[in-house]
Image: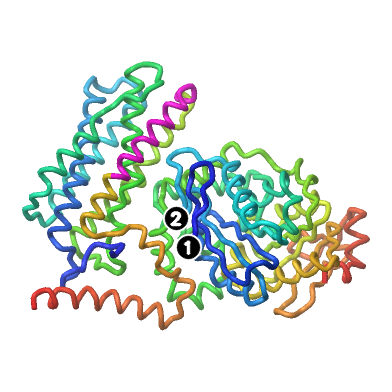
C-alpha cells in the first residue's frame, strides 16, 4: 500500500508486476476501488506489465473531499501519479468515469503517455445518459449505496455471469456498501453537473488510442464510444462480443489480452488507428476482425450505411496489418 | 484491531459496553442536531425550505427514540468526560464569511448535519453477517440508512444557488465540521479498539470462489458463536 500527496490530499495507490517496463495505469469507474482491479491487474501482470491502480478522490482509501470534487482535481492526481512513475512507456486505461478522466488527461498531457485505452467511456452526456445519471443519484440518496449497486449489477454484467456468480452478489453488494461512502459517491456524481462536452477537444489527443466498447453495453451505448473514435485521430474502436459495461470484471483475461496487444502494437510501431472499427475475437488469442464494410456499426441489426465516411470505408477493408 | 464491533455474543448481539459507548455518541450528536433544528424552527414555518428542516427535525427525533430504546445500556464512567467533550464540539458556530449571522448559523447547522450524516456510519461497524433479528443492529442500520437520506437536502442547500456567493464560507464550514466529527468519531472507535480503515483490507467478493464465499460466511458466524463461551470460561 502506498500514498501520494496531491494538493494536500492523500491518494491511495498500489503497484504490482515487474517494475521498469511498460506500465498500465488503471483509472476506476464510479463505484470502484483499487481492489476491484485485482483479477484484471493480475492478468496484465501475467503478460509482463507493471500495473498501477489508485483510488480517485472520494473513493476507497483516498481522501474524500466533503462537498466539492472537481474533475480537474482528479486529472491532477492522475498527472502526479504518472509523473512519479518516471521515464517509461506508460499506458492509461480508464473505465466509464475513469475513462473520462483519462481522456481529460490525454487532451492536455497526451505527450507524456504511450497510449490511451478508454473503456465503456464517453466525452458527452446526451439526454439519455444524463437522465440515467439523475436517476442513479436519486436512487443513491433515497435508497443508499445498496440500491445503486442493485441498479448497476444488471447494467454491468450479462445474465449468464450474474447467474454463474449468484453466490457472491450479496457479499459483493455488502462489500461495495462498506467501502463506498454515500456523500463521496454523491460528490463524484455531482462533478458531472457542470460537465462540458469534451468532444471539441478530442482532436488534441494525438496519442495512440484504443477504444473498447461492450457489444451489449446499454449504460454507455456504442454511439458514445464512437464519438471518441470519430474525433481522436489515431484511434480505433474495438467492439467486445457479448460484453456489457463492466467487462474488466466479467472478462478480465480477455480484456488484458486486448490491452497487451495494443501496447505491443504501439511499442513496435505497428499501431495505426486510422479511426477504424473492429470486432474483438471470440476468444483469447484470436484475431480482431474489421467491422463488415458498408454496414452501420451503430445499429443492432445489419443495416447498410447510407453514406459511409470516406476514412472508415477505406480503412475498414485493409487494416489487418495495422491493428492486429 | 478489528474493523468491526464485537465479538458478538452467542445470540449475535454487540457487547453492551460497546452498545452504550456508541449509542451515547449518537445520542449526543443527533440530539445536538435535533436541538439546533428545533431552535431554527422556533418561529414557525414561513418559508418552503423550513418544511424540509421540520422533516429533518422529525427524523432526528425518531433516531433518538430508536437509540434510546434499542440499546442495552450499562454504566460507563468514561462517558462523564466524553459527553462533555462532544457537547462542546457540537455548539453552533456561525460560518465566517456568510451574508449575515442568520445565514452563518444556517450554514453551520447544515454543515454539522452533513458531517454527522456523512462521516458517522454505525452500520458499517457491524460484523458482516451479523443477524438481522436484533434490535440494536437493526437500529444502527436504520440510522445509517436515514442518514444517507438526510444528506440529500443538506447537499441541495449547501450547494444551492442562494449560497453560491458564500461558497468559500460554505466549503470552509463543511470542511471544519467534517474534520471535527471525523476526529471525535475516530477517537470513539479507537477507544473501542476498532480500526475503521480495516474494512478496506477485506478481499473483494469478486475474487472469492463459491467455496471461499461460503467459508467467509461460516467463519463470521462461527466467530460470533464461539466468542461468548470463551469469554465465560
Q: Residue at x 83, y 64 (%)?
A: A271
Q: Is residue A65 left or right of residue B136?
A: right
Tell me where residue A287 sits by quadrant: bottom right
Residue B98 to residue A103: above or below: above
The colour scheme used here is rainbow
- SS of the residue under disc 2: loop
- Crowding around mark 1 (Cα neighbors within 10 Å: few <14, some 14 to 19, many 20+) is few
Instruction: Return the x and y of residue B143 as percentages of the image width and height.
Output: 27, 50
Residue B129 to residue A148: above or below: below
Q: Nearer the viewer, residue A316 or B158?
A: B158
Q: Are marks 2 and 1 in contact (CB under 8 Å)?
A: yes
Q: Badge 2 is on which residue?
A: A61
Closer to the chain start, of discs 2 and 1, is 1
Q: Is residue A170 left or right of residue B83?
A: right
Q: Is residue A299 left or right of residue B227?
A: right
Instruction: Single out the residue that lies furthest toward the left.
Output: B75
Instruction: Return the x and y of residue B117 as percentages of the image width and height.
Output: 33, 44
Tell me where residue A195 sits by quadrant: top right
Magenta segment, prevailing SS (helix, strand or loop): helix
The quadrant in which the C terminus of chain B is found is: bottom left
Chain letter for the residue marked with disc 2 in the picture: A
Q: Which segment is the magenta one?
A: B163-183
Residue A80 to residue A37: above or below: above
- SS of the residue under disc 1: loop
Q: Badge 1 is on which residue?
A: A1
Amino acid at each position: 500500500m502506498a500514498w501520494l500527496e496531491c494538493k494536500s490530499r492523500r491518494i491511495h495507490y498500489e503497484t504490482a508486476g515487474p517494475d521498469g517496463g511498460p506500465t498500465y495505469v488503471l483509472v476506476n469507474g464510479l463505484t470502484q476501488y483499487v481492489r476491484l482491479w485485482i483479477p484484471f491487474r493480475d492478468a496484465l501482470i501475467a503478460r509482463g506489465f507493471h500495473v498501477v491502480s489508485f483510488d480517485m478522490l472520494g473513493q476507497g482509501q483516498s481522501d474524500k473531499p466533503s462537498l466539492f470534487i472537481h474533475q480537474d482535481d482528479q486529472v491532477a492526481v492522475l498527472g502526479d501519479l504518472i509523473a512519479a512513475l518516471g521515464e517509461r512507456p506508460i499506458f492509461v486505461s480508464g473505465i466509464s468515469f475513469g475513462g473520462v478522466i483519462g481522456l481529460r488527461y490525454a487532451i492536455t498531457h497526451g505527450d507524456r503517455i504511450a497510449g490511451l485505452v478508454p473503456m465503456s467511456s464517453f466525452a458527452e452526456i446526451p439526454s439519455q445518459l444524463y437522465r440515467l445519471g439523475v436517476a442513479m443519484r436519486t436512487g443513491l440518496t433515497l435508497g443508499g449505496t445498496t440500491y445503486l449497486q442493485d441498479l448497476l449489477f444488471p447494467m454491468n454484467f450479462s445474465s449468464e455471469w450474474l447467474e454463474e456468480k449468484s453466490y457472491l452478489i450479496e457479499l459483493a453488494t455488502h462489500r461495495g456498501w462498506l467501502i463506498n461512502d454515500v456523500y463521496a459517491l454523491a460528490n463524484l456524481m455531482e462533478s458531472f453537473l457542470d460537465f462540458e462536452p469534451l468532444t471539441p477537444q478530442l482532436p488534441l489527443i494525438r496519442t495512440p488510442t484504443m477504444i473498447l466498447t461492450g457489444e451489449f453495453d446499454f449504460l454507455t451505448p456504442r454511439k458514445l464510444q464512437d464519438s471518441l473514435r470519430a474525433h481522436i485521430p489515431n484511434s480505433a474502436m474495438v467492439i467486445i462480443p457479448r460484453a456489457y459495461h463492466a467487462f474488466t470484471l466479467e472478462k478480465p483475461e480477455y480484456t488484458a489480452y486486448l490491452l497487451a496487444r495494443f501496447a505491443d502494437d504501439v511499442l513496435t510501431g505497428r499501431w495505426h488507428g486510422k479511426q477504424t472499427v473492429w470486432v474483438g475475437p471470440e476468444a483469447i488469442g484470436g484475431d480482431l476482425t474489421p467491422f463488415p464494410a458498408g454496414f452501420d456499426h451503430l445499429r443492432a441489426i445489419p443495416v447498410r450505411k447510407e453514406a459511409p465516411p470516406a476514412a472508415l470505408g477505406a480503412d475498414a477493408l485493409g487494416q489487418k496489418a495495422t491493428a492486429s | 484491531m478489528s474493523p468491526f464491533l464485537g465479538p458478538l455474543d452467542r445470540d449475535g448481539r454487540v457487547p453492551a459496553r460497546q452498545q452504550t459507548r456508541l449509542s451515547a455518541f449518537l445520542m449526543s450528536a443527533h440530539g445536538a442536531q435535533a436541538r439546533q433544528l428545533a431552535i431554527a424552527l422556533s418561529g414557525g414555518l414561513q418559508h418552503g425550505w423550513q418544511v424540509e428542516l421540520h422533516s429533518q427535525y422529525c427524523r432526528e427525533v425518531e433516531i433518538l427514540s430508536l437509540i434510546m430504546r434499542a440499546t442495552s445500556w450499562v454504566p460507563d464512567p468514561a462517558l462523564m468526560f466524553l459527553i462533555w467533550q462532544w457537547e462542546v464540539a457540537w455548539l453552533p458556530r456561525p460560518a465566517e464569511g456568510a451574508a449575515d449571522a442568520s445565514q452563518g448559523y444556517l450554514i453551520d447547522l447544515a454543515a454539522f448535519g452533513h458531517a454527522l450524516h456523512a462521516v458517522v456510519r454505525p452500520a458499517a461497524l457491524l460484523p458482516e453477517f451479523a443477524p438481522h433479528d436484533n434490535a440494536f443492529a437493526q437500529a444502527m442500520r436504520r440510522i445509517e440508512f436515514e442518514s444517507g437520506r438526510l444528506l440529500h437536502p443538506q447537499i441541495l442547500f449547501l450547494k444551492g444557488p442562494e449560497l453560491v456567493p458564500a461558497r468559500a464560507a460554505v466549503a470552509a464550514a463543511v470542511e471544519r465540521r467534517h474534520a471535527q466529527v471525523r476526529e471525535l468519531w475516530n477517537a470513539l472507535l479507537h477507544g473501542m479498539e476498532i480500526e475503521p480503515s480495516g474494512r478496506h483490507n477485506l478481499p473483494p467478493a469478486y475474487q472469492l470462489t463459491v467455496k471461499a464465499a461460503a467459508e467467509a460466511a461460516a467463519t463470521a458466524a462461527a466467530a460470533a458463536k464461539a466468542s461468548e463461551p470463551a469469554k465465560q470460561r
